[in-house]
Image (cartoon, helix red, strand yellow):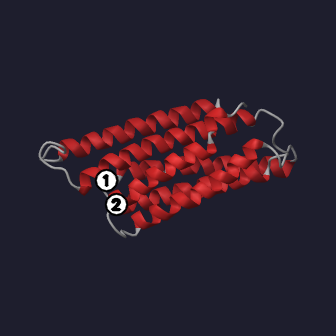
Amino acid sequence: MLDRVSVSVTLTTIIAILAKLGLLYSSSHEAWFDERFDLEVVYFVLVGAFLIFFRGKMMHDDSVFFEELKSSKFKKDAHAKARTKSGLLLGYLSWFCWAPAIYFLERPSAVGWWLVISLALSTLWLVADIATRTSGDDPELKKRYVFLVANVAYAIPLVLLGTKKGPPAVWVGALLAILVIDWLKSDTLSTSA
């Protein structure tokens, strides 16, 4: 059930991103690639690609987590269950932060700050996940530590994007590079749940 929610959120996010890019393109009086090609256009293309692929990666990561919730990989005491539920709530709240990030897509600083908030909530969810696992030698637990390092790496260009330090296209390009490295290092698709 929860896995289907994650897939639905991902598909809705992708449709919203594509719709927003379409609105931005149609409201422009110049065709992006025929009459104009500048850093603003590069930013839109890169941020759209980043958001779509980052949400896809998150969906795969969430899928493994939701599948493992059914197993014995988590502590079953009352405190652990409360931490797991609190973590899930934080994760759901992190998903909501994507809506304003997409809505304000043409304002890179707003995108940066909304995604920083989303990432912070996701990181707290990740900490709750790590704190409630039963085994320290679980390969999925080790991936969770890789996710923590990746979240810090994502936060740096997002903060720079939010504070308007340099061209937005540069920071979104850095986010895409981090995403590729994160995907290769965490290797979520090879997980056997």
Residue 133 picture location, percent across and down:
80, 47
Q: Residue at x 64, y 56 (%)?
A: 148
Q: Is residue 135 above or below residue 163?
A: above
Residue 39 in sight from this viewpoint:
yes
Depth order, front residue of 162/87:
162
Depth order, front residue of 93/164:
164
Residue 78 picture location, percent across and down:
85, 48
Q: Is residue 193 above or below residue 61?
A: above
Residue 2 in sight from this viewpoint:
no
Pointer 1 and pointer 2: residues touching (CB < 8 Å)? Answer: yes
Which tag, 1 or 2, sits closer to the chain's start? 1
| Residue that numbered label 1 is attached to | 43
Q: Quadrant of residue 162?
A: bottom left
Q: Residue at x 32, y 64 (%)?
A: 167
Three-letter amino acid code at disc 1? Answer: Tyr
In this rendering, position of residue 81 left or right of residue 20: right
Q: Residues within 10 Å of mark 1 (few under 14, many from 20)?
A: many
Residue 79 picture location, percent across and down:
83, 52
| Residue that numbered label 2 is attached to | 168
In this rendering, position of residue 89 left or right of residue 173: right
User: Looking at the figure, which quarter contains the N terminus?
Assistant: top right
Q: CA distance from mark 1 to mark 2?
A: 6 Å
Three-letter amino acid code at disc 2? Answer: Pro
Q: Helix or strand or loop: what does disc 1 sit on?
A: helix
Q: Which mark is residue 127?
A: none
Residue 137 picture location, percent across and down:
82, 46
Q: Quadrant of residue 123?
A: bottom right
Q: Helix or strand or loop: what does disc 2 sit on?
A: helix
Q: Quadrant of residue 113?
A: bottom left
